[in-house]
């Protein structure tokens, strides 16, 4: 019984064990196809953009909040990036051309978009006291509407960011992978090794107690939602770099995917508990399931069923941990 309780208190290890079991099962079912370095490298590239978004979402959920505006942050990040490229004359860059100035212009535009969405979310949630679910639902619709207006409903293609999306700084490793790892490391340091992280956990556990010990809860929540917005905008930049086009209608479920990854990683949807490493593991579970189903000839729609069941189990375990902690 004591051992079982200890396991319940380490959600990251439970998630990691589940991921290893899934990998082992698919490796047995499809030896030589699933468990190859090339396949895992492709998987890492596929989850890189979602990983970036999920790091920011982890901070938000630890404060007992939620951010449904992720799709609008990503799409506006894409749109602002291509508009910035147009302003500096880099939109029509030909394949193979490398202009570092164009890359920084697009990055600046994407970050500006993320900051805008994050600032609105933070002000509405922290200072206007609107529930995060409703506040971010509003910015979700408004942000996508602004993107459609700016683009006139049409996507824009560009090759100016190909060196980021399709290049390789490390031999054989696509750029998106080390970029995502840098974001993971930065998120880990900020959440687990800095005062900012301790304040984030404190607010998620008990905002009134955090306020009584001198934490400016409203200002901190604003910063947390800014982080969520910036990671979404940066993900939009990476999306344009990888797909060489904006995708106004292509991110409609990214908010659900990010929340699912964070929850699977052991972050409590009720706040106060979570980890960046757990989120990193949680991002991989849906990706591995989908990849394994495809390789084994199973309809990928079963992925949604499997992920849904795993998510329910993860939330149930979180409830058990909370009850155990409360009794203790």
Image (cartoon, rainbow, N blue to C red):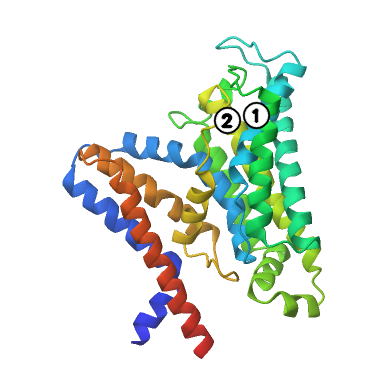
The answer to whether the residue labelled 1 contacts the one labelled 2, judged by CB atoms less than 8 Å apart, is yes
Dot 1 or dot 2, earlier in sequence: 1
Q: Position of residue 228 (x, y in %)?
A: 65, 50
Dot 1, crowdedness within 10 Å: few (<14), some or many (≥20)?
some
Instruction: Name the quadrant containing residue 221.
Output: bottom right
Q: In this view, does 315 lie to the left or right of 18?
A: right
Dot 2, crowdedness within 10 Å: few (<14), some or many (≥20)?
many
Q: Is residue 257 left or right of residue 71?
A: left
User: Which element is circle 1 on?
Assistant: helix
Q: Which residue lies furthest to the bottom in this view?
A: 328
Disc sitting over residue 248 in the figure: 2
Q: Which of 242 and 117 is in front in this view?
A: 117
Residue at coordinates 58% horizontally, 32% vertically from top-left? 238
Answer whether residue 7 is visible to the viewer in this image.
yes
Quarter of the N terminus within the rendering: bottom left
Q: Position of residue 29 (x, y in %)?
A: 17, 46
Disc sitting over residue 148 in the figure: 1
Q: Which of marks 1 and 2 is in front?
A: 1
Q: Is 136 situated above or below 299?
A: below
Q: Where is residue 311 in the image (x, y as percent from the top left)?
A: 40, 60
Disc sitting over residue 116 in the figure: none
User: Which element is circle 2 on?
Assistant: loop
């Amino acid at each position: 019984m004591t051992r079982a309780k200890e396991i319940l208190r380490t959600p990251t290890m439970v998630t990691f064990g589940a991921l290893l079991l899934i990998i082992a099962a698919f490796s047995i079912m499809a030896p030589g196809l699933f468990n190859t370095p090339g396949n895992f490298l492709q998987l890492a590239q596929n989850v890189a953009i979602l990983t970036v978004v999920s790091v920011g979402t982890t901070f938000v959920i630890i404060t007992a909040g939620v951010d449904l505006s992720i799709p609008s942050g990503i799409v506006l990040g894409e749109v602002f990036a291509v508009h910035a490229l147009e302003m500096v004359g880099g939109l029509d860059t030909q394949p193979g051309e490398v202009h570092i100035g164009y890359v920084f212009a697009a990055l600046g535009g994407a970050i500006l978009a993320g900051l805008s969405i994050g600032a609105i979310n933070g002000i509405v949630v922290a200072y206007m006291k609107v529930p995060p679910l409703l506040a971010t639902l509003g910015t979700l619709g408004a942000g996508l509407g602004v993107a459609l207006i700016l683009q006139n409903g049409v996507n824009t293609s560009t090759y100016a960011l190909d060196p980021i999306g399709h290049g390789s700084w490390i031999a054989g490793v696509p750029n998106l992978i080390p970029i995502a790892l840098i974001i993971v490391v930065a998120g880990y340091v900020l959440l687990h090794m800095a005062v900012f992280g301790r304040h984030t956990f404190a607010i998620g556990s008990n905002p009134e107690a955090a306020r009584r010990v001198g934490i400016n809860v409203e200002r901190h929540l604003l910063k947390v939602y800014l982080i969520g917005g910036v990671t979404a905008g940066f993900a939009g930049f990476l999306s344009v770099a990888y797909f060489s086009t904006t995708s106004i209608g292509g991110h409609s479920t990214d908010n659900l995917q990010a929340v699912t990854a964070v929850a699977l990683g052991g972050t409590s949807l009720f706040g106060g508990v979570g980890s960046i490493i757990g989120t990193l593991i949680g991002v991989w579970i849906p990706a591995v399931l989908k990849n394994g189903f495809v390789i084994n000839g199973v309809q990928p729609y079963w992925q949604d069923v499997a992920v849904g069941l795993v998510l329910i189990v993860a939330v149930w375990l979180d409830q058990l941990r909370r009850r155990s902690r409360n009794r203790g």
